[in-house]
Amino acid sequence: MDWELLARANTHRLRISILEALDGGRTLSPKVLSVELQAPLGTVNYHVTQLAKSGLVELVRERQVRGATEHFYRAIGCDKRTTGLEPATSSLGSSRSTS
């Protein structure tokens, strides 16, 4: 995994949300992501394109819709299966005893 690309991609909170939405092998279009994330389609499309250029998401398929092309993407190497890492969890505010 290219940690520099991952760090650059994570500089914008919408990109993090996009990667989280695509986690687990989900394949979604920017249109569907914009609805799920409640963000403007143009903004989501821009950030998905940047994630694709960084190699963190890949174009899986295309579909013709009324003269336009809808693109579908999935995350690459951002889940436990490929990185071997568990998601980070915080123990702040936990009621568990550490003794």
Image (tube, rainbow, N blue to C red):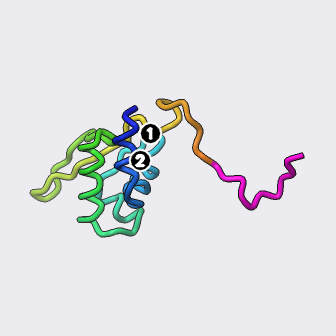
Q: Quadrant of residue 39?
A: bottom left
Mark 1 vs 2: CB contact within 8 A: yes
Tell me, yes or no, whether the highlighted magenta stretch contains residue 91.
Answer: yes
User: Residue 89: x and y, percent?
Assistant: 64, 49
Q: In which quarter of the image is residue 65?
A: bottom left
Q: Residue 22 carries which label?
A: 2
Q: How crowded is mark 1: few (under 14 residues within 10 Å), some or many (20 or more)?
A: many
- The residue positioned farthest toward the right in the image shown: 99
**Residue located 44% across and 39% down the image:** 78
Tell me where the magenta segment starts and ends, as one range.
Answer: 89-99
> How far is the residue under mark 1 from the one under mark 2?
9 Å
User: Residue 27: x and y, percent?
Assistant: 36, 45
| Secondary structure found at label 1 | loop
User: Residue 38: x and y, percent?
Assistant: 39, 69
Which residue was labeled with disc 1?
78
User: Residue 63: x and y, percent?
Assistant: 20, 47
- Depth order, front residue of 26/63: 26
**Residue located 26% across and 50% down the image:** 50
- Depth order, front residue of 84/97: 97
The quadrant the N terminus occupies is top left
